[in-house]
Image (tube, rainbow, N blue to C red):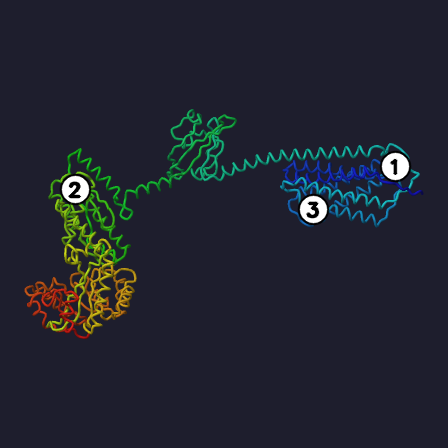
Amino acid sequence: MEHLHGSYSLPLVFLSFIIATATSYSALDLAGRIQAGKGKIKIVWLLCGAFSMGIGIWSMHFVGMLAFSFPIPVFYHIGTVILSIIFAIIASAIALSIVGLHKENRSGRLFASGLLMAAAISGMHYVGMAAMSLEISYDWGIVMLSVAIAALASFAALWLLLKLRDTQSPYAVWFKVGSGMIMAVAITGMHYTGMAAASFNVSNSVELNSGLLQPQGIAYGIGAATLLTLTITILTSLLNKRLSDKDFDIERHERWYRSLYDHNIDGIISVSHEGKILHVNPAVEKITGMNTAHFLQQPVTEIGLIEGCSDKEFQQFKRKNYDTVYIRPDGAKIDLNLMHVPVIINRKVAGTHIMMRDITLEKQTKKQIQHLAYHDELTGLPNRRRFNHLIEKAVQDSNQTGDPFVVLALDIDRFKMINDSLGHMYGDLFLQKVSKRISNQIKNDDAILARLGGDEFVIVYKNYLDIKTVESFAEQILTLIQKPFHLKEHDFYISASIGIAIYPEHGEAAGELIKHADTAMYEVKKNFKNGYQFYTKSLNEHLEEKLELESELRRGIANNELVLHYQPKFSVDGEVVLGMEALVRWQHPQRGLIPPGLFLPIAEETGLIFDIGTWVLKKACSQMKTWQDKGGLQIPIAVNLSSQQFHQLNFEQHIQSILVDTGLEPKFLELEITESMMMDAKTSTLTLQKLSNLGVKISLDDFGTGYSSLSYLKQFPINRLKIDRSFIMDITNNEHDKAIVSTIISMAKHLNMEVTAEGIETKDQLDFLLPNKSMEIQGYYFSKPLTAEDVEIHYMRRAVLE
């Protein structure tokens, strides 16, 4: 048997590599097409791809065999050739099915598929070799190497297919070209390694017949046909990719639209050109409470949403925006905003979208905001803005009808005391009770109550008969307010001040009437409160004077015009000075010495009382320390507190700071408070206890004039009671005053409290108190308030040690 030796045709070898590269690139691109396909399209791409890729791999193999030339003619068995083609197609089908039909990249499936693919490729190669009309013997070591190369090539091919099938990189084509060349090297390497394993011998039994294929001239034809097939495949794939990308863009835009349509919080009803409902989004069901079937294919004008619009009018498809009311199946009434938006396709109106929004809450909120804009949030009464409109209308109505009306400005006396003592929460509750009580009283009268702010109310009273009717109306309001209010387990008694202005007698403009009613009201407050007052022209002068005094007081505080006078407290016999009370005065540059009764109420109204109170405390403590350092008065200095001072935050720390700054020992400071400061027993007890712990003495001023004095004595750490001057004034001829004073003295004695009687001005008053040796006496009978210099001159040597 003669052994044959042959040689390779380099052009055909290169052609085989080109075919392998094109086949690999085609496989990489087809993998992505199959993965992106859906349903039957995926199977069609798989079958076509397997055939195209299989023919490509087989062509590379066949061209590679034809590249090896023999010295004798060589023929190929057609049946065996076809079988090798089938193996190539099987190998391609395995690769593409693994990549295209499975999304998960499991290592076990990849390994098994790689072995099957390697077996199919190896089978293709060696079956194709068997088709030759030569006897072939193999070097089995090299054969195993070629199979190993086939396995590695299969694993590499599958791995690259999986990695590159979904790539969206702009360089994806070059990635696939480079990967295709790597796969081509692996595939051609397997083929030529297999060829190297073969030894060819001449066979005498081979005869030319119809079952044999003559290879002359067909290598290039096969290569060209294969390349053409692969090219068509690749071009088809690229065209399909472009179409798929276009379909994907369309689908993506459709999904964007559907997402906007389906997830829009506003309802959307899509209506055809004929006025039939085509689609509704889920929000329509949620808003209307009706399911989708209720709407579909129904005339849009019959679903109870389109307001005042016939079929013909609706089909005009004009942009329209309006509000309507819809009653849900559950009976709930909702407010809707509807907007018609025409659908334009090819410059023609194809239908319309009806955008539906539930504005029920929005309308309620607007209504509430509008209500709050014209009504007091706390009481629900008309506020200042609303009242200005009401009184303007009252003026207009009065001008047309000739019927008069009056404006009553009402201010609660002692409200500040309640607010400071109980806190703002109870202050607000109190105002609600007041407004409700007055509203209930006047609801049958032709009157309107409004709250302008704080404790300031105003009433417009229309169609009264005469002045006596107005007076009776004002007295009813006063009597109503004087009834006790129950707050925090206590009954509180208050009063009110009412100023009255008549239209048009006291002013023809609305603002002028309110101003004049306020002026009259302030006059009542100045004159002991709890009453009513009609406006008079002379009241303006008092108001202007008050405003001027306030301005001058601010300048006076800044210019250090305030001074302290000191009124001594004596033993009953008048021999010993037991204490001093600091009394603030205002040394006005033009008006002279102004008593506290004229400027302290203004200070309390404007908040200046904090600055004045702090100045008095520091000045009094500093003065007493100065007297002590001179070796004189070793007695306590008493200072009156305002309600605002007493209820300021951390008041005890404020007192301690003043004592430290002035150097005065706490036992020489006596703070005078009133019952009105202690309505909130819990807070007051805590503050008084802290002051007592500092060593400061507490004196209860004006004792007997409040409502709950005895309960205060039980709860609070009080050192001294001061009998109010109203009980001392008629003590010589009024048996009730005598009994009250005697009772207070006896009670204080049994409670281990000290007593001071203020307002002693006559010897008869002193004689009545003379038997009570341990009490203090204060009044003009012994001494009026003195300057610091006069105190040093008259009393430094008479003072005693505590």
Residue identifier under label 1 = 74
Q: Is residue 314 above or below residue 18?
A: above
| Residue 504 at least partly seen | yes
| Residue 84 at least partly seen | no
Q: Position of residue 599 (x, y in %)?
A: 18, 56
Residue type, numbered disc 3: Trp
Q: Nearer the viewer, residue 198 or 489?
A: 198
Q: Nearer the viewer, residue 353 or 159?
A: 159
First of labels 1, 3 by sequence position: 1
Residue identifier under label 2 = 406
Q: CA distance from mark 3 to mark 2?
A: 98 Å
Residue type, numbered disc 2: Val
Secondary-structure class at tag 2? strand
First of labels 3, 2 by sequence position: 3
Q: From the viewer's perspective, is 72 left or right of 700?
A: right
Q: From the viewer's perspective, is 772 left or right of 618?
A: left
Q: Nearer the viewer, residue 592 or 201?
A: 592
Secondary-structure class at tag 1? loop
Residue identifier under label 3 = 159
Q: Position of residue 387 (x, y in %)?
A: 24, 42
Q: Position of residue 198 (x, y in %)?
A: 86, 45
In the rendered structure, are the residues bearing label 2 and label 1 in contact, judged by CB atoms less than 8 Å apart? no
Q: Position of residue 97 (x, y in %)?
A: 69, 42
Secondary-structure class at tag 3? helix
Residue 16: quadrant of the picture? top right
Residue 400: quadrant of the picture? top left
Badge 1, how many Cα within 10 Å: few under 14, some, many 20+?
some
